Amino acid sequence: MGKNAEILELRRVYKSFRSKNGGLKVLADISLSVYAGEVIALVGPSGCGKTTLLNIVAGLLDPDQGDVNQKQGLRTAYIFQEPRLLPWKTVEANLSFVQHNFLLPSEAAEVRDNLLQRTGLEPYRNVYPAQLSGGMKQRLEIVRALSIRPQLLLMDEPFKSLDLALKYQLQELIFERHAEEKFAILLITHDPEEAVMQADRIIVLTDKPTNIYREIIIDLPRRERSIKNPELYQKLEEILGFLLKKQQ
Amino acid sequence: MNNFTSKLNHVLKKALISTTGILVVLILWNILAKKYHPLILPSPKETLGALKHLVESGQVWTNTIITFRRTAAGYAAALVFGLLTALLLKASHFLQSLIRPVITVVQIIPPVIWVVLAVLWFGIADDLTPVFLIFIVTFPIVFINIFTGLESIDVNLVEMAVVYRCSKTKIITNIYLPALVPHFVSALSLGLSFAWKSTIFAEFIGSSSGIGFALSMANANLETEKLFAWTIILVLVMLVFEYGLLYPLNKKVTRWKQHG
């Protein structure tokens, strides 16, 4: 990974929230670097503050302590767990709404047309989100993230509520685009198999106050990965073992 | 084409049912009117005669215009103040704690008390009493609708816009305003109905012109058929506003809510 440029750095980040019984320490001393083009999966016990970490990276939360440094003008997209579409804007207007903050109108239109074609959303271009099915809304959420030609894509379990077929279809779309455009991905997942199959690096997080338990590097090209591969299987078992121990 | 025919059938069916309801009321009215003295219940025919007289003598237009003008003045003031107060209270927690209870108290006080107070304060002031009543009755309704709208703005959407680096102006015009429009139209619609009723009420008690005053005169002179005729005019005016203006407006601004 070293040969790629660093696009984001978290240095000794701490975050607490106020709660009834005083402060709730969520993140404690998290340091993490993200390099251009790599896929990082964040895995950890549920409620360990993965979303908090992602929100700090996205600039939605400020850390109590520590620094977040990012490459100047870093183009960040975020695929939320539930689609966050503007209900009063059509499919196309939902895309151009964010695109115009980053791209020139001609480039925006080209990227938009291409993505709508590839994802089968083209016939729904002028339709409002209320008229789309749940799966189509999530597809649009993903298309919106890709439509700004991001350099960093944040994903907070975006396939959680989808059926398997749709999940694979959407994953394929993202990784196809990732192969073409080489953006970095920071992905939260509760599924260690998903992490092992897709990430270049897996960051295993501890329970609250959350710290980094282990960093697992997966050096195999994505296409050659199979869960039957003994090396991958061993890594998967290691993560599962840690998560199961946490749950007991 | 098939779709169009089935839609047309649906509309016709609905219209037929609605018309039947009104027809049944008219028939019942006619039957009952035969049993009672016109002073108690004038027949539809007598009412129609009175209505014709009101139209021909021009009383309908002059009184409707007066009532309408007052409603518009009080209603417009309530809309502007309701909107401004909602925005102000949303922006400041201090003002919210200070003013919110006052608005609740204003809203709880029955309109009849306000009208009595208005007559005491302003006398039988032709415009002031009705306009005051409309304002005081309509303002809390407008305020609550818009404030609720402001409260219900989806923070998730704002967060999304922040991540995608939308400017504050872009967030206000593309998220806050569109989210608020349906609440504003609902405030318009509810407010208008309250405003219109308040005007009539205030004119009935504390004015010497307008439809409310005409109603009180008909009542005092025991001209029950005129009372009925004026009621029909009131209903018609409200229907024109509701279905000619507010309903299409509401449909237009909530177009995006309709499912496929």
Image (cartoon, rainbow, N blue to C red):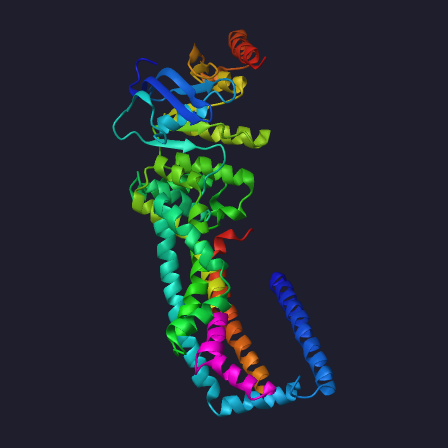
State the predominant SS element of the stretch in magenta. helix
Residue situated furthest left in the rendering = A72
- Spot occupied by residue B244 in the image (x, y as percentages of width and height): 49, 71
- Closer to us: A112 or B50: B50
In the displayed structure, would residue A82 be above or below residue B26?
A: above
- Spot occupied by residue A219 in the image (x, y as percentages of width and height): 43, 11
Give the tally of numbered discs. Answer: 0
Q: State which quarter of the image contains the C terminus of chain A.
A: top right
- Spot occupied by residue B201 in the image (x, y as percentages of width and height): 50, 74
Q: Quadrant of residue A53?
A: top left
Residue ID at (41%, 26%): A18
Asked whether B220 falls inside the magenta stretch, the response is: yes
Question: In this view of the protein, can residue B3 be seen by the observer?
Answer: yes
Residue ID at (43%, 69%): B117
Asked whether A203 falls inside the magenta stretch, the response is: no
B200 relative position to A105: left or right: right
Q: Which residues are magenta?
A: B196-225
Residue ID at (36%, 41%): A98
Q: State which quarter of the image contains the N terminus of chain A.
A: top left
